[in-house]
Amino acid sequence: MTDLLNRHSFVELGARQRAKALLDAGSYRELIDPFQRVMSPWLSRQGVVPQADDGVVIAKGTLDGLPVVIAAIEGNFQGGSLGEVGGAKIAGALELAAEDNRNGIPTRAVLLLETGGVRLQEANLGLAAIADIHAAIVDLRQYQPVIGVVAGSVGCFGGMSIAAGLCSYLLVTREARLGLNGPQVIEQEAGLEEYDSRDRPFIWSLTGGEQRFNSGLADRYVADDVAQIRQQISELLQQGLPATQRSRQADYYLARLAELDAAPQIEPATVRDLYQGERS
Amino acid sequence: MSGLQWFNALSAGAAPVAGLPASLKVADGVLGEQAVRFIAVVPDAANRFPRARQGEVGLLEGWGLAKAVDEAIASGDQRPIIAIVDVPSQAYGRREEALGIHQALAGAADSYARARLAGHPVIALLVGKAMSGAFLAHGYQANRLIALRDPGVMVHAMGKASAARVTLRSVEELEALAASVPPMAYDIDSYASLGLLWETLTVSQIEQPTADDLARVSDCLVQAIKDIQNSGVRDLRGRLGAVNRAASSHVRELLREQW
């Protein structure tokens, strides 16, 4: 009980507060802040009110004294969807972090992922920006760890779930969901029998943070607490690059999938058993 | 089926690469005088995963693409990689989500991006649909994107029916909006206006390429390979600069100033 009272929820914080909570006190500096009003050029004409930061916060600072750039997606603006401006902010920040490293400055990156993926009102420019983000993660990852955090409550979907899969390390909470396709879209494409988007326990049992961690598809499973999340990110930053990047384990996953009887519909336990022991 | 047709035409006489899922066609052939690897995702009616039988990029396809590209990187010869793109979508299914299709697609994107960074010219040839997550896994990490000019060739984030549902519009409303908002459009000319394509080509028979069609496309691929090799650029900056993508450049300039 005392433990609960002492906790400060990370999930309840907005993108800007999250970034501030992670960085060393006094080190937070936002780039292209909302007062600069760099907004989506595409939303107004579709009757959607744009936001002054386009739903993405880029902050530089230090974490335990290490140079870090944080890209935080605001899940409360348009479902955390990525359009041209927000996407370019994340890609551009990662590109500059990689350039820093080529110039001898060891900038690391932390991505706070609350996103449904591409913003459909900016469809192809969102998709292109996400391809740029993928490219930039793979580039930066050569030098320093890129840490993905899916805390909740939006979760991480679409092209940005691929970005999560490219991160050096992935940290999730019990509130997190991580999957390529949103439940509604799967139901629309494949039918209710395949995927019931309104069955929340079912969705969480397959794509929730605990299941992803227990299946080896995430590296840390943390309580929804600012101090604990900060501590885990700090440890991962100190750890440096992972011995083996999860997205480079094609042989391992192809071998596991070859063992699976794919005929019956799948259960969460089947996934855990199949991928068990993956974590080294 | 354009993907398979173009794969067969371009890789005629090439050595097929074994040890990959049946839904992947991979061959080491020659383009001009250069050894290249061709890669396509094709329908496989016998796919063990029922939601990935019509050319969708699913679990086996994502990890299989990663393996096919990794092998090319391991050859150490910086051979060009030609991704032939005709992918209707990623696979939508319970097995796919449960088994981490996002991670499989990350595997593919990872390998293509590392190939590019390692100096392999990577080219995506769009001969059909290039949809959403499927395109992110197979093609979007290329140095150069080349599209055939045809109503069947399209790039998009989501099919029309689902996009309409998610944005709470009717399909008709969506189409009307798409006509006036270039990034929302489904046609290749609107896509070209975003500056993401290096070249568009007209062919006479996209479903069954003629000798002339094949020669035109092959020549364009050879030019693209040379262009990449001469530029020495291994990132994706060549896609920036179009008026319809001005904000992407503007944001980068501001970030650099304020960094």
Image (cartoon, coloured by chain):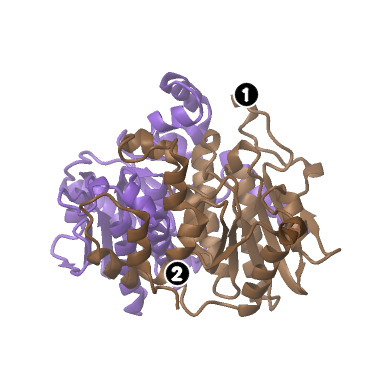
Chain colours: A brown, B purple
Q: Nearer the viewer, mark 2 or mark 1?
A: 2
Q: Residue A28: which quarter of the image?
A: bottom right
The disc, 2 or 1, on the residue closer to the chain's N-terminal end is: 1
Image height of A219 relative to B25, above or below? below
Q: Which residue type carries mark 2?
A: Arg
Image height of B44 relative to B38, above or below? above
Q: Residue A225: which quarter of the image?
A: bottom right
Which chain is disc 2 placed on?
A: A
Q: Which mark is residue A246?
A: 2
Q: Which mark is residue A58?
A: none
Residue under label 1:
A47
Q: Residue furthest left?
A: B13
Q: Work out whether disc 2 and disc 1 sit on a shared chain.
A: yes
Q: Position of residue B56 (x, y in %)?
A: 29, 47
Image height of A3 relative to A248, above or below? above
Q: Position of residue B239 (x, y in %)?
A: 52, 52
> In what quadrant of the picture does the N terminus of chain B appear?
top left
Q: Secondary structure at mark 2?
A: helix
Does residue B138 appear in the picture of this structure? Answer: no
Is A188 on the left-hand or right-hand side of A140? left
Q: Secondary structure at mark 1?
A: loop
Which chain is disc 1 placed on?
A: A
Which residue shows up at 60% across the image and 43% down it?
Answer: A80
Q: Position of residue B115 (x, y in %)?
A: 41, 69
Q: Nearer the viewer, residue A202 or A110?
A: A202
Q: Position of residue A125 (x, y in %)?
A: 53, 42
Number of other residues with Cα within 10 Å of mark 1, as a class: few under 14, some 14 to 19, many 20 or more: few
Q: Which residue type carries mark 1?
A: Gly
Which residue shows up at 68% across the image and 41% down it?
Answer: A54
Q: Nearer the viewer, residue B14 or A240?
A: A240
> In what quadrant of the picture does the C terminus of chain B appear?
bottom right
Is B211 on the left-hand or right-hand side of A47? left
